[in-house]
């Protein structure tokens, strides 16, 4: 979870409200204060709020009067920087005991002549706005991820170096382009200091040798621009007979994993599938035994990817997935960090050859992507 740094409004309550002893911390914000209500949990009073929506809490909002830029304009980009700095300054002012989150707020009355408002979601002027809450009562605020400065959002290399140095801790999605937007020498430079990274770099080098264009990049460039993901190049496309042999090897090793885990019945099902070239029928299967066996072994194979110990490995995994939006590519590259006896090179070779497969009932359908 990260903080919203482009929000243009703030909720205050308790001692931070107008007239309160801590209001001086926010009194210089540009705009007018408007009275309303927010919801909090049982036991909430004054500055001490709890999770929940059982109690109405008197609160105020201010909408920053200097935030008038239209989205996707130069003024908007400048406003994003200004807001980032404003929220960063406010975070420091509010102190370590408070964390910034977002909560719903409703005006006291929608119109001055209306009766008092009821806090109903999606109605009565509801707004979702930044607010500071006591961290001791809202544990999810203890370990928020950092948000890049707006001017650094697209500088993936800079974000990666900040991450490695410990200066920042970003969410993994920030690094989905970390590999595909760079050449192999650039990747080697960025990753060379990571522990036990040589097997990974060897596989990454193989990938670039297999897939990179003359430009040195994995993404195809055309007159219309970049492709979003790497795709198998025509020179590597294999025949259907070759694809079937690769799939047989993959199903055999998946069957072995089921057997090792004591599920001989499901293991046997994967050994009995028929093979057919072409896409599977779109009709729903009414025989799930073989498909269940296939799903179970895939869960066993995928489990190590969910249990990586270091945050940087998850970031690297996201970058590997982002190359081709494909798990076979990701797992081929990350396999030396997984603790499972499975040859991830086999499904990678199928992907590189331009094919994929799916099981439907007791038939394995193999087809061109």
Image (spheres, rainbow, N blue to C red):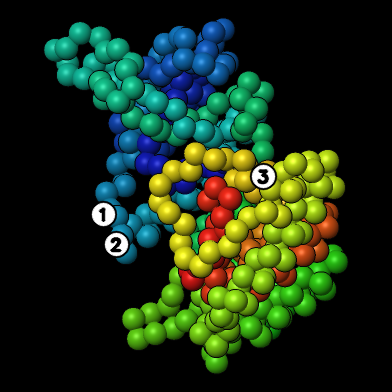
Front residue of 14/362: it is 362
In the image, what residue occupies the spot 55% across and 92% down? 214
Question: Where is residue 284 shown, x and y percent of the image?
Answer: 44, 43
Q: Which is more foreground, mark 2 or mark 3?
A: 3
Q: Quadrant of residue 18?
A: top left
Which mark is on residue 293? 3
User: Can residue 243 be seen from the camera position used here?
Assistant: yes
Front residue of 189/71: it is 189
Tag 3 and tag 1, C-beta contact below 8 Å: no
Distance, label 3 to label 1, CA atoms, is 53 Å
Front residue of 77/22: it is 77
Question: What element does badge 2 sit on?
Answer: loop
Q: Which residue is mark 2?
A: 73
Question: What element does badge 1 sit on?
Answer: loop
In the image, what residue occupies the spot 78% across and 41% down? 263
Label located before the other in sequence (2 or 3): 2
Q: Which residue is mark 1?
A: 70
Question: Where is residue 151 shown, x and y percent of the image?
Answer: 48, 63
Q: Quadrant of residue 160?
A: bottom right
Distance, label 1 to label 2, CA atoms, is 6 Å
């Amino acid at each position: 979870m990260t903080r919203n740094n482009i929000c243009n409004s703030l909720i205050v309550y308790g001692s931070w409200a107008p007239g309160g002893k801590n209001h001086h911390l926010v009194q210089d914000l540009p705009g007018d204060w408007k009275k309303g209500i927010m919801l909090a949990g049982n036991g909430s009073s004054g500055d001490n709020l709890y999770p929940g929506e059982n109690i109405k809490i008197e609160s105020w909002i201010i909408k920053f009067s200097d935030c008038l830029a239209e989205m996707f304009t130069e003024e908007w980009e400048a406003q994003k920087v200004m807001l980032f700095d404003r929220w960063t300054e406010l975070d420091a002012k509010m102190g370590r005991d408070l964390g910034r989150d977002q909560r719903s707020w409703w005006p006291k009355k929608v119109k001055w002549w209306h009766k008092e408002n009821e806090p109903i979601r999606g109605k009565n002027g509801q707004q979702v706005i930044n607010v500071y809450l006591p961290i001791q009562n809202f544990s999810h605020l203890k370990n928020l991820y950092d948000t890049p400065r707006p001017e650094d959002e697209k500088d993936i290399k800079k974000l990666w170096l900040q991450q490695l140095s410990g200066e920042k801790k970003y969410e993994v999605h920030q690094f989905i382009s970390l590999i595909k937007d760079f050449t192999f020498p650039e990747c080697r430079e960025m990753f060379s200091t990571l522990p036990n990274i040589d097997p990974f770099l060897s596989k990454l080098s193989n990938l670039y040798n297999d897939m990179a264009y003359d430009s040195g990049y994995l993404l195809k460039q055309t007159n219309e621009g970049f492709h979003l993901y790497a795709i198998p190049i025509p020179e590597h496309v294999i025949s259907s007979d070759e694809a079937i042999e690769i799939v047989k090897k993959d199903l055999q090793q998946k069957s072995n994993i089921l057997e090792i885990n004591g599920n001989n019945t499901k293991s046997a099902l994967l050994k009995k599938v028929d093979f057919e070239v072409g896409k599977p029928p779109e009709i729903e299967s009414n025989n799930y035994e073989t498909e269940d066996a296939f799903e179970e072994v895939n869960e066993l194979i995928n489990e190590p990817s969910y249990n990586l110990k270091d945050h940087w490995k998850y970031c690297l995994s996201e970058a590997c997935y982002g190359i081709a939006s494909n798990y076979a590519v990701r797992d081929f590259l990350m396999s030396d960090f997984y603790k499972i006896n499975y040859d991830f090179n086999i499904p990678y070779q199928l992907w590189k050859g331009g094919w994929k497969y799916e099981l439907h009932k007791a038939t394995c359908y193999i087809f061109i992507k």
